[in-house]
Image (cartoon, rainbow, N blue to C red):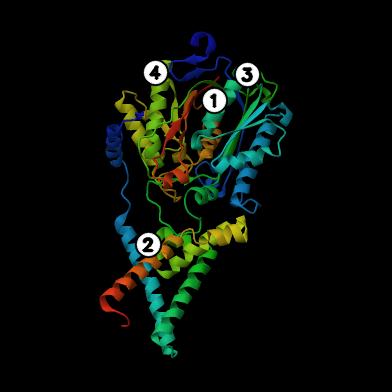
Amino acid sequence: MSSKVPDDAKSRYARDAARYRPRPPYLRNFLAAFFVGGAICAAGQVLHSAFVAQGLDDVEAGARMAAALIAVGALLTGLGVYDSLGRFAGAGSAIPISGFANSIVAPAMEFAREGYVLGMAAQMFVVAGPVIVYGVLAAFLSAAVRYLVLGTGG
Amino acid sequence: MRAIHAKHRVGRRSLVFPGRPSVLSTFTVAGPMEGQGPLGRAFDTVIPDTFYGERCWEQTESKMLREAIVHCIQAAGAAESDVDVLFTGDLLAQCIAGSYAARDLAVPHFGLYSACASFAEGLIAASAFLEGGFAAHAVVAVSSHHDAAERQFRFPTELGVQRPPTAQWTATLAAAVMLGYPGSPFAGGAGRVRITGATLGEVIDVGVKDPYDMGTAMAPAAVDTLATHFKDFGVPPSYYDVIVTGDLGAVGQRIAADLLESKGLAVKDRFQDCGLLLYDRARQDVHAGGSGAACSAGVFCAHFYRGMMNGSWRRILFAPTGALHSPVSSKQGEAIPAICHAVALEAV
């Protein structure tokens, strides 16, 4: 069946309409992401150093630092602050682990209204799910490549 | 055959309403952010927070819609039993805002969906009911709620995401109008704003897939319906004091204006968009402007209807557009089909 708007008219419209589209403020977005993301990472480094100073080894201090950032990200989401931070900083607040916490707590909060089982629990990973699935898959594949190239052990 | 069976039809897609169904009353219930916008003082009610005493936003939207309907009927001095048919439109899946609002009303109900063009669809359907003698009084009411729409169409509201500058802000608003005939016993002689005609929209899909750029997706539908309107009625754009689109926003409105001008239709000196009037874009973080089913309806009631009543404008062509995609169709890679229905109004 032929389309009411032919394909060449569609591509012409896409080209013409693109001229009207305002450019995102790239420089401002880059700077906001750089400084907010950097500040979150610096806070993580301060925590890490503090835990090391308390006598924890590097791995334990890293785990505690990650848990602390997750807790803060979850808390700020619950207080309704993290979405405003995200609107300002974009990837700067989405990429660090506190953003991962935000991506789980935000749907959990919202879908709690449809019940704790079919709402909150079922929908909790609606945003983070793909990250977990493909993260685990990527980890498995890279481990498999490492095993094939280097053999077992380190 | 058409001459006999469709006597109120002109041209390819237009209707005339010789009985001139008229607006008897309007009522608006606005969200807090809309209350802080340039039209804040023109809304009948501004709710204090986005929940309005309910436990979820879908119920809030329904409550706002119900209050708009009830108070609109009261404002005309009528009772529920005087309303022969109620048309509602909203953006929630299965149109639950309208159904739950009508649950408590003893009024026959039709639920409509043309996304953000639903209000115009309702005005046309109600006018046809009146003109056909199937109703003496009808109510048309639509609603939208920012947070309820965000979670249905985009992301959970507390997720920290950055929106592109073409994105629009779904309005938290409900608006209702009661229509009847000139000389109706209600509204004490109001009804000075008459619906004289309409042009029905076709679904137009120009292949735009970005749900954050709905103005670009909808502009060609507005151009198609407006150009058809001027052709069917044989009038130039200057016949109207204002030509108003619903929520094309800053991007879509400029595209539509240029496309109409390129067809020889000089609209630019009288072209307005409800999405650009609802918020102060310099002060409120709404990117390309407002949107939502009730954006056009709320701005119509609070701004254009009042302006017609106080003599600022005599003739208005009101042409809201709707983006007819769903979250499912978007994920499946479909483009965004759009529609625009136009309603011609005249103050007497």
Q: Amino acid at mark 2?
A: Ala
Compared to B70, does A69 lie above or below? below
Rendering coords of residue A57 (x, y %): 41, 88
- Camera sees residue A88: yes
Q: Amino acid at mark 1?
A: Ile
Q: Earlier in the sequence, mark 1 or mark 4?
A: 1
Q: Amino acid at mark 4?
A: Lys
Q: Residue at x 34, y 30 (%)?
A: A5
| Position of the C terminus of chain B by quadrant | top right
Say which element carries label 1: helix
Q: Residue at x 40, y 56 (%)?
A: B162
Direction from residue B286 to residue B173 in the image, left or right? right
Q: Which residue is mark 1?
A: B124
Chain of the residue where label 3 is placed in the rendered structure:
B
Chain of the residue where label 1 is placed in the rendered structure:
B
Direction from residue B52 to residue A124 in the image, left or right? left
Q: CA distance from mark 2 to mark 1?
A: 46 Å
Q: Are marks 2 and 1 in contact (CB under 8 Å)?
A: no
Direction from residue A89 to residue B74 in the image, left or right? right
Q: Which residue is mark 2?
A: A91
How crowded pointer 3 is (Cα within 10 Å; few <14, some 14-19, many 20+) is rated as some
Q: Residue at x 63, y 43 (%)?
A: B62
Q: Are marks 1 and 4 on the same chain?
A: yes
Q: Which residue is mark 4?
A: B231
Q: Earlier in the sequence, mark 4 or mark 3?
A: 3
Chain of the residue where label 4 is placed in the rendered structure:
B
Tag shown at residue B182:
3
Of circles 4 and 3, the one toward us is 4
Q: CA distance from mark 2 to mark 3?
A: 58 Å
